[in-house]
């Protein structure tokens, strides 16, 4: 019986730790709004159908498309699928297209920095060689909205170096989806601050933006100690 209880506690502890890495939300992070039929797109940006992708603010740039790639259209090296849902963001860098969009996760939207919690921003990207190829670039960062604007960043607007160095270092190739991640280690003085996510890109498809909240090991240890306490009480 004792072994069974221990096994149950181990499973529950593992489940609890895994469950703590939760996506904290955001609006239209996989660009499923608006609904787009297969092999079609909705243009966004100044003078286009939409001023910006729904849920996102427009910063600079000329154009981005919310596109449902379908399965049969590979023009300019387009993917035949996206990583989450039906739509992704697309620009054609060879035509001078790029975009800069942002979204705030703050108290007003119900998302904010918590104490003793680390954060991980992940973005799925796809670099079609037939479009902008080695000239494609991708810049993503998130910053705190607490007046200090401390930021964690990947890439630099207009420069392909970071993207292609990342692909080489991790064995990623053109014309395949891969994930870029940015960790942020929280410190207590930022508790209650919001986050601003900014995406800037040319010649890159983007999908499935997410921010995960991961409690620090000390918090997880407290849960483990609590479970051990339950086991000791059971023995008594």
Image: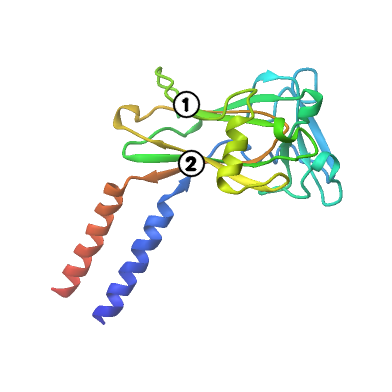
Count of numbered marks: 2
Q: Residue at x 76, y 24 (%)?
A: 97
Q: CA distance from mark 2 to mark 1?
A: 15 Å
Element class at badge 2 = loop
Q: Is residue 75 above or below residue 42?
A: below
Which residue was labeled with disc 1?
143
Crowdedness near tag 1: few (<14), some (14–19) or many (≥20) residues, C-alpha within 10 Å: some
On residue 24, which mark appears? 2
* Quadrant of residue 96 within the rendered picture: top right
Q: Is residue 186 above or below residue 23?
A: above
Element class at badge 1 = strand
Quadrant of image for the N terminus:
bottom left
Q: Nearer the viewer, residue 190 or 150?
A: 150
Taking the image as shown, residue 192 lies to the left or right of residue 49, namely left
* Quadrant of residue 226 within the rendered picture: bottom left
Q: Residue at x 37, y 68 (%)?
A: 11
Quadrant of image for the C terminus:
bottom left
Please state the horizontal and vertical placement of residue 205, each as a whole percent of the image.
Answer: 71, 38
- Of labels 2 and 1, earlier in sequence is 2
């Amino acid at each position: 019986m004792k072994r069974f209880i221990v096994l149950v506690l181990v499973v529950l502890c593992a489940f609890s730790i895994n469950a703590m890495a939760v996506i904290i939300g955001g609006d239209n992070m996989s660009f499923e709004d608006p609904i787009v039929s297969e092999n079609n797109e909705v243009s966004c940006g100044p003078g286009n159908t939409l001023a910006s992708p729904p849920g996102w603010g427009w910063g600079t740039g000329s154009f981005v498309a919310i596109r449902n790639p379908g399965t049969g259209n590979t023009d300019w090296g387009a993917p035949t699928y996206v990583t989450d849902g039906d739509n992704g963001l697309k620009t054609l860098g060879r035509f001078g297209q790029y975009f800069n969009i942002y979204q705030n996760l703050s108290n007003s939207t119900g998302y904010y920095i918590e104490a003793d919690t680390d954060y991980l921003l992940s973005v799925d990207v796809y670099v079609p060689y037939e479009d902008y190829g080695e000239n494609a670039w991708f810049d993503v960062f998130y910053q705190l909205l607490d007046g200090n604007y401390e930021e964690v960043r990947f890439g630099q607007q207009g420069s392909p170096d970071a993207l292609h160095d990342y692909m080489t270092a991790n064995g990623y190739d053109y014309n395949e989806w891969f994930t870029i991640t940015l960790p942020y280690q929280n410190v207590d003085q930022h508790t209650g601050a919001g986050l601003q996510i900014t995406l800037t890109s040319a010649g890159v498809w983007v999908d499935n933006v997410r921010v995960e909240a991961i409690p620090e090991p000390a918090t997880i240890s407290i849960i483990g100690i609590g479970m051990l306490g339950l086991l000791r009480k059971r023995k008594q």
